[in-house]
Amino acid sequence: METLAALLEASALGQWARGSAIAYPTANVAHLLGLILLVGGIGVVDLRLAGFLRRLPAEPLARALTPFALAGLALLAASGAVMFSADAGPMAASNVFRAKMALIAVGLAHAVLFRWLWRAKMARWDSAPPALGRLMAAGSIAIWLCVGALGRLIAYA
């Protein structure tokens, strides 16, 4: 991992991210926008699926907001790669950064499992929400909020 981090830091992307007056700040703002889109989009859906906002039909809400969450995830990945490349060595050695990456993997696996388990049953969610599904939706909110918190803590670790 250290070798890969050193190569990335020395790459043209790493040099640009460190050397440009606007690259890192722009990536940082884009990362924040990505977090807003991800947590805002999937967070509202998860709140609905967890049992809140019951007046909103679950399936159309999920269909409308999931693309925003996916766009946010893509923006987070792209902007995160720029920020990581600027300081890859120390970041790769950071326990907080590693915890964030591990929790992202958990969050993505959780999202895939959730879709696999509940997608075909989403139309019935308004009348009979499954207890496990509600628990998983609440877990999703917790996972992504923890990912965001760990991201902020990287600067202080």
Image (spheres, rainbow, N blue to C red):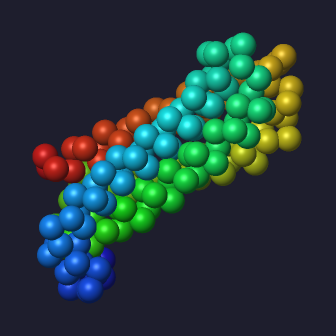
Q: From the viewer's perspective, tell me whether residue 10 is left or right of residue 143.
A: left
Residue 145 seen by the camera:
yes
Q: Is residue 127 left or right of residue 1?
A: right
Q: Is residue 151 above or below residue 89?
A: above
Residue 132 position within the rendered picture, expressed as x and y whole percent measured from the top left: 69, 28
Q: Residue at x 49, y 43 (%)?
A: 37
Residue 135 lies, in percent from the top left, at 62, 26
Is residue 113 positioned above or below 140 on the image? below
Vertical comparison of 25 with 15: above or below: above
Is any part of residue 132 visible from this angle?
Answer: no
* Above or below: residue 135 compared with residue 143: above
- Residue 66 location (% of width, % of height): 64, 43
Q: Residue at x 72, y 45 (%)?
A: 115
Q: Position of residue 152 (x, y in %)?
A: 25, 44
Q: Nearer the viewer, residue 31 or 102?
A: 31
User: In the rendered image, which quarter is residue 13 located in?
Assistant: bottom left
- Name the side, left or right, on which 1 lies relative to 49: left
Q: Residue at x 64, y 23 (%)?
A: 48
